[in-house]
Amino acid sequence: MNKTDKDTNPTPNAQDVPVPRDPLEAKITPGNNQLLLSDWEPPQSGIVPLIRFKKNWYSILWALPIIFVLLVAAVAIAQGLREVPSVQMFIEHYPGTPASAAVVETGFPLWLRVSHFLNLLFMTFIIRSGVQILADHPRLYWHRDSTPGTEWFRFQKPVPEGRVWTAKDDSVTIPGWLGIPGVRHSIGLARWWHFSVNSLWLLNGIVIYILLFSTNQWQRIVPVSWEVFPNAASVALQYLSLNFPPDESWTKYNSLQQLAYFITVFIAAPTSVFTGFMQSPALSNHLGWFGRVFNRQRARSIHFLSLWWFLFFILAHVTLVFITGARVNLNMMWAGVNDDSWSGFMVFIPLITLVGILWAMASPFTIRHARLVQRVGAFVVGPIKGWAEWFDPKSELTEKDISPFLWPNGTMPDSKEFEDLVANDFADYRLRIDGLVERPAEYSLAELREMPQQEQITTHFCIQGWSGVAKWTGVPMRHILELVRPTPEARYAVFYSLADGAHGGVYYDCHNMENMRHKLTILALDMNDEPLSVLHGAPLRLRCENELGFKMVKWVTAIEFVHDFADLGSGQGGYNEDHEFYGYRMPI
Ligand SMILES: Nc1nc2c(c(=O)[nH]1)N[C@H]1C(S)=C(S)[C@@H](COP(=O)(O)O)O[C@H]1N2
Ligand SMILES: [Mo]
């Protein structure tokens, strides 16, 4: 078709009709593709971790002298016990391995050695990004809400009183060699690492499970007789007396060793996966009573204890590998041979150097190529997130579950416009709805209050790790959809705030239409039977219970229906997505 044909065509096709745009689109600012430290929350150090017993807090540094004294005492006692005839008989009877234990003659096959290495590599990324995530809300709780003062563990000072202290204010810096990327409040990027590498680790784990049980390799690490317990006690006594039991190298493990591997592979790993998933708003809010019992804070605490098991295991495992004959042990696990050559070292040294290089590069790379990390992360875990988003959340909590405290979060509005609205008790407030809708509309607060109201008691899940229960009342989004009638082209609803985000430019966030149709998606006007406070989003905020908190825009002023969000800001689907590298879909 030549130019003249097109120019003279009297009927414009659908693409030529100008799409109505909300004026606030112009106030969106794109984010940087790098994590710019000059435009970021300034560093803030935490404190030495504390654990609470009853009303008192104790530094975990006390553990060092306590463990030392206990170990010395245990060695003395164990050595004394080994002189006692009945103990000697016990050790003779239970030498360390049940007589029934199978002998694995096949060594460590290649698949086992490769998956062992991958496991080591993945675990370095998982642990580091996990610690980074923890530092975004450096407190742990055992119960459903996250009320300050009720933590059992923290590495941050008590919450200051007499001022607004948001969850973002509370985040602390950890060094770049430890966390990934080692920048305060970099949870968006840490999560991409954590979840992408978790997926690889999980795949590796599934392959390991399958191959363990389709060969005889499982026999080394799965106990099959109750005698494993007295034998493990016997081994512990022998180790503690510093007179080690005989080593049967890779044909069979002693009972203590077997239990340690069993716990790691079959208890700690699944526990971590399970408690990881239970921290997701979509899964937890969908699972009803199960989500209440295994609530997010409990799951997060157990997830953390599971980390400690892994750290303890790694320390013990590596120490024993090196003190019970490093060369032979390395030959077995890295070269697959049982001799005293140097072949294990020849494989181990380059591979562990590679791990070291990747370790050193991870944080600087992530800071420099933050947008890339976000894109690759979303590509790897996007399908899992899409699957989780599909769950319709339930509201099964009751009045007595309502938390005494809900952390405030985000950047407060500080415009003259907002001040005037507050001064007038929001009498001049209008909610504007436009974009791809048949009937654009503007509603006053009074009109919104006359619409059908829905009440729900739900848990709020902030990406940073805290959660809390509140009762929300407001207009179901389904009702709004009936009023304004989005056109078939509309695929997303963009929520605009009266407040700017932390790095300048209007705060906004996009949701897909399925989220808008969920039973519990409402435009909340009340929180716990009172009109919303300014802190929590007055006069109107979104509740969308299968997403993380940052997607629930506070101080909503406009909703625009669009076909695509690629042309808004950096095109990532929202303010924190553009500026802090969060994901557009965040049901986990
Ligand atoms: N406009 C705006 N809305 C926002 C934020 C923000 O910074 N600006 N923060 C979000 C985040 S990260 C969370 S966890 C919730 C917190 O809601 P709350 O302060 O009522 O607990 O609001 C969300 N809505
Ligand atoms: Mo949040």
Image (tube, helix red, strand yellow):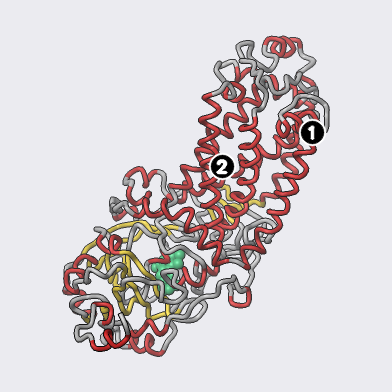
- Asked whether residue 536 is in view, the answer is no
Residue at the front extreme of this rendering: 2
Residue at point 67%, 39% (across, down)? 314
The crowding category of the residue bearing disc 1, from other C-alpha atoms within 10 Å (few below 14, some 14 to 19, many at least 20), is some
Dot 2 amino acid type: Ser
Quadrant of residue 480 within the rendered picture = bottom left
The residue closer to the viewer here, 167 or 118, is: 118
Mark closest to the chain's N terminus, 2 or 1: 2
Q: Position of residue 202 (x, y in %)?
A: 52, 42
Is residue 253 or residue 295 the one in the foreground? Answer: 253
Please state the horizontal and vertical placement of residue 450, each as a whole percent of the image. 16, 74
Query: Residue at the spot x=68%, y=54% of the render?
Result: 358
In screen coordinates, is 23 left or right of 442?
A: right
Q: Position of residue 69 (x, y in %)?
A: 76, 37
Task: Give the residue at x 36% y 83%.
Answer: 24
Q: Secondary structure at mark 2?
A: helix
In the image, 532 versus 339, the foreground residue is 339
Residue 101 or residue 263, whichever sits in front: 101
The residue that mark 2 highlights is 306
